[in-house]
Amino acid sequence: QVQLAESGGGLVQAGGSLRLSCAASGSFLSINDMGWYRQAPGKARELVAAITNGGSTNYADSVKGRFTISRDNAKNTVYLQMNSLKPEDTAVYYCNAGARSRWSLNDYWGQGTQVTVSS
């Protein structure tokens, strides 16, 4: 089993910054792709940014140039640096990771962390 522990959410004014962290722990051989999703009230969950274990990244158009995803493979941790935050970035942010065990590759989710951007 794999646990994803998120931290770093909070309340910030528009134009401000936050950094989210997500550490994977538990029983696994390796962590593959990691990413951040978000879900605003009344909306579907959407991909914000993703990163492979080789460091290739992918971003939603709405956050390109403002958010940066990175990871520390030695710590099985992924980060999301969020700059120039806008009220429309307000959502619950979820960490996602693919973890490989001896027999399978499974998808895991964190519990979510609230990000609120005030205007």
Image (cartoon, rainbow, N blue to C red):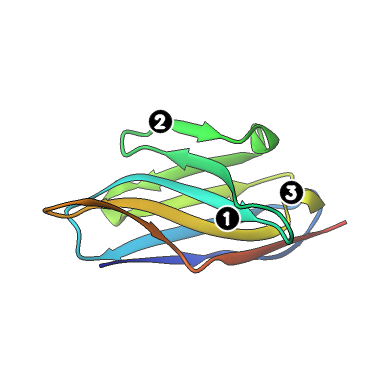
The residue lying toward the viewer, choosing from 104 and 4, is 104
Disc 2 to disc 1, C-alpha distance = 19 Å
Q: Position of residue 64 (x, y in %)?
A: 64, 33
Image-based side of 115 in relation to 112, left or right: right
Q: In percent of the image, x 56 and y 35: which residue is there?
A: 59
Q: Quadrant of the C terminus?
A: bottom right
Q: Position of residue 86 (x, y in %)?
A: 78, 48
Identify the disc placed on residue 118: none
Identify the disc placed on residue 85: 3
Q: Which residue is mark 1?
A: 19
* Residue 74 versus residue 92 in the image, above or below: above
Q: In percent of the image, x 37 and y 34: which residue is there?
A: 55
Q: Position of residue 41 (x, y in %)?
A: 73, 61
Few, some or many C-alpha atoms within 10 Å of disc 1 (few <14, some 14-19, many ≥20)?
some
Identify the disc placed on residue 56: 2
Upstream in the sequence, badge 3 or badge 1? 1
Residue type of the residue flagged with mark 2:
Ser
Few, some or many C-alpha atoms within 10 Å of disc 3 (few <14, some 14-19, many ≥20)?
many
Residue type of the residue flagged with mark 1:
Arg
